[in-house]
Image (spheres, rainbow, N blue to C red):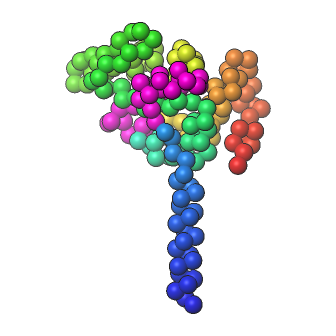
Amino acid sequence: MSRYLYFSWFVLMLSTYTVHAQNKIKWNTWDEALEKSKKVKKKIFVDIYTDWCGWCKKLDHSTFAENHIAKYINENYYPVKFNAEMKESVILKGVEYKYVNSGRRGYHELAAYLMQGRMSYPTGVFLDEDFNLIQAIPGFQDVDNFEMIIAYFGTNSHKSIPWNKFMSQYNHQAYYSK
């Protein structure tokens, strides 16, 4: 009988783990996001990071790992993970952006463009369905703050409601029902 209970407990724990891990952000390259956008229009969320950035890693392992965050991002955006120090060129809206060698560490021109010259990592960038800049938001975002931010832009509330009013009226269940 104890073997049966142990096996049942193991199966229960395994299924619980699977449920929690089922929604991961499905990161795209620029080219993938561009191609997908030709078929179905969605906003684009860009996570600009560097390999050496500790807060970037914390964001990946905490906020981005939350099931409801990943689900909302995947449903409402084409998420792009962009290394601000990558060496490959990227073409966006007919403009080629390249890596710029600058001292010990260089930077990618597209990262500088999207962050409007404010090189801070991590930075979350929101683009509209036509890859036009909506807003760049620098710094680590905890789960509570980030879920409000992605709902604000994901629902186009930024077009009609000031951020402070949106925050004061925000209701988690309205955007993240289970």
Q: Is residue 10 above or below residue 59?
A: below
Q: Is residue 25 visible?
A: yes
Residue under the image location 64 percent in, 25 percent down: 153
Find out whether residue 139 is within the magenta segment.
Answer: no
The tally of labels here is 0
Residue under the image location 53 percent in, 59 percent down: 18
Q: Is residue 137 visible?
A: no
Residue 98 at x, y percent in the picture = 31, 16
Residue 144 at x, y percent in the picture = 62, 41
- Quadrant of the drawing holding the N terminus: bottom right
Q: Residue furthest front?
A: 39
Residue under the image location 24 percent in, 18 percent down: 101
- Magenta range is 27-56
Q: Which residue lies furthest to the right in this view?
A: 169
Q: Is residue 21 above or below residue 82?
A: below
Q: Which residue lies furthest to the top in this view?
A: 94
Along the viewing direction, whichever of 1 and 156 lies nearer the viewer: 1
Q: In this view, does 77 lie to the left or right of 29?
A: right
Find out whether residue 48 is within the magenta segment.
Answer: yes
Along the viewing direction, whichever of 18 and 47 lies nearer the viewer: 18
Residue 121 at x, y percent in the picture = 42, 29
Residue 135 at x, y percent in the picture = 56, 19
Residue under the image location 69 percent in, 27 percent down: 155
